[in-house]
Image (cartoon, grey):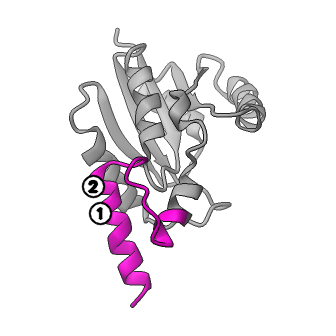
Amino acid sequence: MKQKAIYPGTFDPFTNGHLDVLERALNIFEEVVVVIAENSQKHALFTAEEREAMTREVTCDYPGASVEVLHNGLLVDYARQVGARAIVRGVRQVKDFEYEFQMSLLNRQLYPEVTTVFLMPNVKYTYVASSIIKEVGMLGGDVSKFVHPCVLEMMHQKREEQNR
C-alpha cells in the first residue's frame, strides 16, 4: 500500500518554502497531495483556481505530488476520503507550532488513524511567509528569490490589475 499524505494550506501564493516542505515530504511519503484550502479568516490575493494552477505548475516535475482544492468541509474528512495516513505541516517558528499542535490534537480526535507530521523548511526559508511575500510583491518589491517564476509572473499580473 502506498504511503499517502496531504499537505494542506492556503498557499497564497505558493512559495519556495512551501516547495521545500513538499520536497521533504516526498522523501518520506510516496504520494503527497497538496490541498489548497479556503480560509475565511485570510484575505486571499489569488482565487482557489489561480492557486491551484500556480501550484500545479510549480510541482509538475515532482513525481508523487498532486494538487487538489478543498472548497469546504473538514480536512480530516478529506484525508479519510483519499486514504491519507498523514497530514504534513510546515513549521517555521514557535508561533506556528503552537497553532499546529492544537490542530493536530483536534484532528487526532476526529480521525485517530491520521498522524500530523511537522517538517521544518530549510533555514533560508524560515522567515518566508506567504503573507509577507504577497505584501512585498504587490508593493513592487523583488520577491524572485522566494517564489517560482510562474508565481512571480502571476503576482506581476495581479499587481497590474490592481493598479488599473
| Local SS, label 2 | helix
| Local SS, label 1 | helix
Q: Are marks 2 and 1 in contact (CB under 8 Å)?
A: yes
Name of the residue lying farthest toward the left: 61
| Residue type of the residue flagged with mark 2 | Cys
From this viewpoint, is residue 78 visible? no
Residue 74, horizontal then vertical, whole percent: 60, 42
Q: Mark number for residue 150?
A: 2
Picture residue at 76% right of the left edge, 38% below the top: 95
Q: Quadrant of residue 5?
A: top left
Picture residue at 57% right of the left edge, 25% below the top: 120
> On the rendered image, what quadrant is the N terminus found in?
top left
Residue 2, horizontal then vertical, whole percent: 34, 12
Closer to us: 75 or 159: 159
Q: Mark number for residue 153?
A: 1
Picture residue at 51% right of the left edge, 18% below the top: 85
Closer to us: 26 or 160: 160
Q: Which residues are magenta?
A: 136-164
Q: Is residue 164 left or right of residue 80?
A: left
Q: Is residue 121 magenta?
A: no
Q: Is residue 21 left or right of residue 98?
A: left
